[in-house]
Amino acid sequence: MQMIEFENKNACLFDKREAKVKKGTIIFLSIISILIVIIVVVIFGFNQQFKVLLKDIDTEFAALENIHLSDIPDGIYQYRYGKIPVIVDVSVHVKNHIIESISINDQSSGPGYEALETVDRILSKQQPAVDVVSGATISSKCIMIATYKALKEG
């Protein structure tokens, strides 16, 4: 009789442990599932935002025209352009109807994708629309657009 009672107690304890393990597994799998859903939503949202950024940049870039520097008075013109993850803030210094310098005040882009050569190309050509830096197309276009808008709207 005591043996049966002992076996029943062990079986009962085993059932409780098994129930706790099942409950823990369910909670763990639920948390993992929620995390996966959150990650997918974030990636999808970033992807959508990036597509909008690319479309906006291409539209703005296609609209770049030659600037008549003779119409631009001396001064420093600033403009901030872009969306996360690529943003650039420029200051364009014009003196005697010549773009003397372009300062990148702030820039957000991936390391190695700053496209700083774009500034030299703009200064050399004295126009915002120049060839993009290979491998840093988005950053190049953002610098060109910001420079153009600084001079046009600044």
Image (cartoon, rainbow, N blue to C red):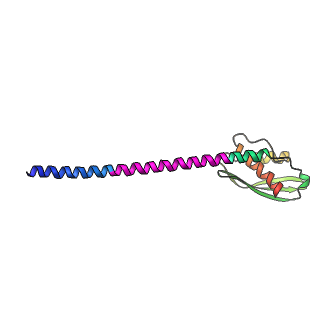
Number of numbered markers? 0
Horizontal side of 122 relative to 21 (left or right) equals: right
Query: Which residue is farthest left?
Result: 1
Q: Position of residue 13 (x, y in %)?
A: 22, 52
Say whether residue 34 is magenta. yes
Q: Position of residue 94 (x, y in %)?
A: 86, 56
On the question of residue 26 being in view, the answer is: yes
Q: Position of residue 119 (x, y in %)?
A: 78, 48
**Which quarter of the rendering shows the C terminus?**
bottom right
Horizontal side of 149 relative to 32 (left or right) equals: right
Q: Which residues are magenta?
A: 23-52
Q: Residue at x 33, y 51 (%)?
A: 23
Q: Residue at x 72, y 48 (%)?
A: 56
Query: Which residue is farthest bottom?
Result: 75
Q: Residue at x 78, y 44 (%)?
A: 62
On the question of residue 140 being in view, the answer is: no
Magenta region, main secondary structure: helix
Q: Position of residue 54 (x, y in %)?
A: 69, 45
Residue closer to the observer: 33 or 88: 33
Say whether residue 43 is magenta. yes
